[in-house]
Image (cartoon, coloured by chain):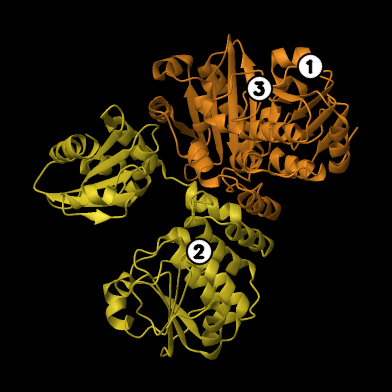
Chain colours: A yellow, B orange
Amino acid sequence: MIIDCKKAAQELRKADNILILTHANPDGDTLGSGFALLRALLKAGKKARLINNDEINKKFSYLWEGTECHDFKEEFIVSVDVAEKKLLGDGVCAQYGDRVNLSIDHHGISRLFAENTFCESESASCCELIYFVIKEMGIAIDPQTASCIYTGMSTDTGCFRYSNVTPRTHRLAAELIEAGADHSRINVRMFETKTMNNIMLERMCLDSLRSYADGKIALIAVTKAMLNECGTDKSALDAIKPITRQIEGVEIGITVKQEEGDKVGVSIRSSESYDAAKICANFGGGGHARAAGCQFSGKTVEEVSGIVVDYIVNTVIK
Amino acid sequence: MIIDCKKAAQELRKADNILILTHANPDGDTLGSGFALLRALLKAGKKARLINNDEINKKFSYLWEGTECHDFKEEFIVSVDVAEKKLLGDGVCAQYGDRVNLSIDHHGISRLFAENTFCESESASCCELIYFVIKEMGIAIDPQTASCIYTGMSTDTGCFRYSNVTPRTHRLAAELIEAGADHSRINVRMFETKTMNNIMLERMCLDSLRSYADGKIALIAVTKAMLNECGTDKSALDAIKPITRQIEGVEIGITVKQEEGDKVGVSIRSSESYDAAKICANFGGGGHARAAGCQFSGKTVEEVSGIVVDYIVNTVIK
C-alpha cells in the first residue's frame, strides 16, 4: 500500500526490534538515510540494527560512529532508498526481500515490494523524507543524525548542484546545519578528497584523451597497466567518467576500460541531444538516457574504442 | 563610515547616475553582485552602468543579457565585493578609487576606502548582502536578478560546499530558486564546463605537482610558457587552484604562477589547521583564512616556490 509520511511514522512508532535495509553498492543517500533512522530509533528506546549486502567504504564511518549494535530477532523490516528488491543485493534480497514491512524511497513506485511504501519521487534524496519521518515521530534530531541526513542530501545532489534540488532541499540543509550537521567536513570528505594515486590516474587518463567529430565526442582509455602503475583499483574510475562530458562542446563522453579477463567495459555520458542508453543498447548494454554502459569480450581497449567511435560517428551523430 | 544595510539602501535610493565598480580579475561574486544591483537600479528607474578593469569571461554573459547600457556622468559610485581600492585594478583605481561613495563587501573592514561601507565579514558572499540591500530598497527580485545573486552565492561557496556556508546561505538559495534563479544551468556553467585548452593546462599542472612535509604541502607551478602552449589565459588558473588542497593529507595547497612583467603570484589554500591569510601576510599579501594570495617581483617561479615552501616548512608547520 502507498502510505504518507504520517502513517510511515506511526508504523515505526508501533514497531520494535527493527531491521534497516540499505541498497547494495551503498551510496551516501542510502547510508545517510539508514543510519539517521537507526540513530532516531535507538534514541526512542527501540532495538534496531542496519545491514548492507556489500562492504561500506570507510569514508562513511562517521555515520555509525558511537551507535551500539543490537542483536535480536527482527520483528519489523524497513528499507531505505531501495527502488526494487533486487537492489538489496543477492544475499540480503534472498533473506529479507519478501518480508519488508515499510519502504521509504524517492525513486518512484513502479516496482513495489514492501507491505507499505512511503515514496516521493520529486524528493532530491531519500534523506529528505527520512528527516520528515523522524520529525513526525517526535524524535529530536541530534548533531550526528543531522550529519547523516545532510550526507544523503548533499551526495544525491552533487552538493546542491543538480536540477533535482528544490527550495525544500536548501531549507532542510539550513535546519540541519542549525541542528549541528558538520556540513563542510562532510563535503570535504565526500567531494574534495582524492588520493595522490587517484591524481596520478587522472593525469594518465588526461594523457589518453582524444576527441572526434569536431570535438563532439571525447574518449578516455584506461588499461590495467595504468591502474597498476597508479596503485588504484577500478573504483577510482568513478572520478574519471565525468571528465569527458565536462569538456566544452562535447556531447558524448566515452570511457573505455580494460576489465577482468578479456572483458572491456564502456561508459557513455551524453548531453540532452543524445541518448546514451540507446547507444549502449546497440552493443547489448543499457542504463539511463544521460549515463549508460556496455561490455565487450575478446577485444583490446583500442579495438573497442574504434568500434564505439565508428558507430557513433557514422550512425548516431551523422 | 561603517553603515548598516538599511542605510546602504537609503543611500542608493537617494542616488542616481550610479556607477558600479567590481574588482579586477572578476569572479562570480563581484559580477553577480554588480549585475544584480545594476538590474535592480534600472528596474527602479535609475540610470546605472557597471565597469570592470579587466575583460569578463564570456561564461558570465547571462548576468548582463538584456540590460541596457546608459551613458552618463556618474554622480554616485558604489563598489561591490572590493576589499581595498587597489583591487579595483590599476586603471579603475586611478580614475575612481578615491571617489567611491558606498562599498558593499564581505571581506572585513581593515582597509576602508569609501565614504560609507556596508560590510558583513561573516557573510559567505557579497551577493547575500546585495540580496538584502535590494529587498530593503523595496525592489522585487526578478528571475534574472535572482540568477545573478545565486551565481555569487554558489561560486563563493564552491556550490554550498565550504565552511563559510551558513543556514542563511541555504535559506536565501531557496528563495532565489523560488524567484526563478536558473540554478542547475548556472552550476553546470560555473562548475562542470571546461574547455579542451583548460583540460590540457590541468594535465600540465598535474605534471608539475610536487609535495613536501610528508605530503602536508602540495605545490603546482605554472609558467607563461604553459599558458601559451595551452592557449589559455590566467583566468583558467581558477580551476587549478583547488587541486592541491583536494589531495588526501594535504593541509596547505600552493599555486605559484608567472604573471605580467617580472611578477610571480602565489595562491594558498589551507585546511582549518593553518591560516592562509597569515602565511600570505608574511609576504605582503592577504585574503581569507582558508584562501589567500601574495605577489613577488623580480624572481623566477622556481625561486618563489622555494621561498614559500621553506617559510611554511620552517615556520608554519614546524
Which residue appears farthest toward the left when viewing the image?
A298
State the residue in front, B260 or A285. Answer: A285
Q: Residue at x 41, y 61 (%)?
A: A27
- Asked if residue B119 shows in the view, the reply is yes
Q: Which label is found at residue B181?
A: none
Category of crowding for the residue at label 1, using alpha-carbon neighbours closer than 10 angstroms: few (below 14), some (14–19), many (at least 20): some
Q: Name the secondary structure under disc 2.
A: loop
| Residue A45 in the figure: left or right of residue B228 | right
Q: Residue at x 32, y 75 (%)?
A: A85
Amino acid at dot 1: Tyr
Residue under numbered circle 2:
A123
The residues bearing labels 3 and 2 have C-alpha atoms spaced at a distance of: 40 Å
Above or below: residue B209 compared with residue A88: above
For the residues bearing labels 1 and 3, Cβ distance under 8 angstroms:
no
Residue under numbered circle 1:
B96
State the residue in front, B214 or B163. Answer: B163
Q: Which label is found at residue B24?
A: 3
| Residue B120 in the figure: left or right of residue A167 | right
Q: Name the secondary structure under disc 1.
A: helix
**Rendered location of residue A311, percent (x, y):** 17, 39
